Each structure stands twice: as C-alpha cells, then as structure tokens.
Image (tube, grey):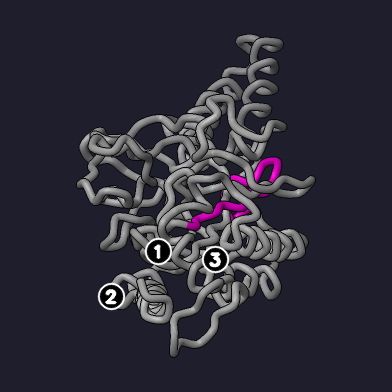
Amino acid sequence: MLIEHNMPNICIKMQSLVCRYGGCCTIWESWWQQATLSSFHTYRKASHERGIWRVAPNTVHCHETNNYGHCGSFDKRFSHHSAQRGKYYTNRFYMKKCKACALWNNLSVMQCVHCLTALGDEDIRLRVVDPLCRTANSRRGETENGTVEYVMLHRCFDFTIMVHPQPSAAIHLSAVPNGTFYDIKNFRKTHVPMITKMKSRCDAIIHDVITGHAGPDYLKNSVSVNHLRGIIQAPQRGSKRRKVSDIVSEAIYGFNYPNNFSHVGMHAIVPPIKCFNLFKSPFFYPLSKVLSDLEHLSQVKAYTADEAKQLYEKDIIMEEIVDIDATFRAQYGF
C-alpha cells in the first residue's frame, strides 16, 4: 500500500540502493523490479482516473452511463465520451459549435439551443474566450469590439450586469460575479449576500429599462419594452392599471449548469420569451434552488441521475415557465 501511494519516491530510493550495492543485492534488485512494475500499473490506473493520462484534468473516468449518455454519478456528468473519436471531452475546455448559427452549446445537448440544429461529436470545438468571461474581467464599459450586445449596464466591486449576448427575450440580462467563477459549483454559502444583491440590482435595472431611464437605445426602445411602457403610462379602458413593479416581479431568475460560457452568469429574463430552450431540464437551475442549496448545504447540489430522469420525463420547471409566459402575454396584451 505504501508503494502504491508513494510509487515515484519509493522507486527512486530503491533504485539508488541497488546502484550502491550492485550485484550483492540481487534479491533486492529482483524485488525492486517486481514492485516497480506492479506499482507503476497501479499508479497509472489511478492517474488515468484522475485525468493525467489522455483525459482532461477535471474529467471523471466512468465505466457506466445512464440512458442519456452521462456518467452514472450525475453531478459529475460533464465528461463526454465520443465513441466516434474514441476520446473523453470535458465541458470546461470543449463545447459544440453550431454549424448553422455559429453559436456555442455545451457538450450534453443534441441540438442547438438557439436554432434547434442537430449537433454531434463532429461539432466539438475547443473553447474560446467568451463575452461573459471577458466582461467580468474587463475594466472598460464595453468589450474591445464595442458591440452593443456586450454593453455593461452596471458594474461594482463584486459583480457586473450586462445584456445577455444571446437573448431569449427583449429584456434578458446576465449578472456575472467578478473574478473566477466557472459555474454554480463554485458558489458557497458566503456568496448568498452577493447573489441576493445581484438579483436586487437586476430588478432595479429592469425597472429603469422599462421606464426608459437606463439601457442602450436598441433595448429600451424595442417593440416589447415600448408596449409595456405604453400600458403603464396609458392603460387601456376597462383594464387594471399596472405598475412597473408588477412587471419586475414577473422576471425569471436562474442559472445554467453546465454553462454555455466559461464564466457563471445569472439570467434575468422578463416575458414575453422568444425561445424556451434555455430552460430545458436538467440544465436550468432556478434561483430559488441555488439559494436554498447554499443556505442548507453550503453548495449547490446538482440533480441526481434519478432526478434528471424524472425531469426528462416531466419537465416541471419548463412547464412552470411556459405558464408564467402565457399568463404574462394574456395580462399585457402580447
């Protein structure tokens, strides 16, 4: 057992012993060769499972998968095995790039979440620096290319709020913690105040966007935002007068795990929603679940294999969001 855990050091010491006493230690030399060979295979097997041999460092080497192609331990599922290429990939370093819209998707999906184009192992590409990561570590008001999709709406010491690069609704914000936060598994209980503050600040920005006091022109003057602003300022005859706070309270908050970006981002989405693929289970984690897990478990608990299977069969999260969107459209005349 000592040799298995300290194989490199033991080999060096025994080798020096053999060299020192030469032929007088043939028994020791024979034992050293056998021990080295046995320990090397044990060490190589352990190293392979830890990701040192041909597998990315954070990849889990699993020998059984469930029906959806993930590891049996669903919270470590983001090692993707490509039978076509005979390799393992991890979502931290690789993604699937859609050939139709050129947008990025995580390794778990079989179709693009943006345009529904079928995706396969031939679409796997090495990750690139994405807008969320670049914005979270930038000190400028915009990214270097200056496109409006990446414009910052708020920045403080702890987090940055920006317009989501690939919006699923007219108002779709992304709140990203500054620094190094790869995904929701990096959150701890001490981050609850920061996440709560991110949510409160997003509420305030949504309020200002609807009233026309914040945001780029293309956002605050969009058709949907103008429609909501008109209802607030001049309600239709016979209809209930709406407040901006009523609209803000309908915002949907949550995270994706695994994330489509190399930096965690909290979604803040106001209906009407154009595309629901973002909310597909088991990849969407509502803000309420994230905060509850952090409060009681001190970290976010990923869906187990059984929970994921149940969500595949009956996606209660998606159904709730679809109901929220339908109710919102009926109330506000969309």
Residue 231 visible from this viewpoint: yes
Residue at x 40%, y 56% (from the top left corner): 168
Point out the frontmost of discs 2 and 3: 3
Task: Please say whether residue 180 is one of the residues in the magenta stretch.
Answer: yes
Disc 3 to disc 1, C-alpha distance: 11 Å
The one nearer the camera, 222 or 329, is: 222
* 75 lies above or below 8: below
Q: Which mark is residue 279?
A: 1
Q: SS at mark 1?
A: helix
Task: Provide residue 130's location: percent of width, then percent of height.
Answer: 50, 35
Disc 1 to disc 2, C-alpha distance: 15 Å
* 318 lies above or below 212: below
Give the amino acid type for the residue marked by disc 2 in the picture: Glu
Q: SS at mark 3?
A: strand
Q: Which mark is residue 313?
A: 2
Q: Residues within 10 Å of mark 2 (few under 14, many from 20)?
A: few
The part of the chain drawn in magenta is 171-186
The one nearer the camera, 180 or 34, is: 180
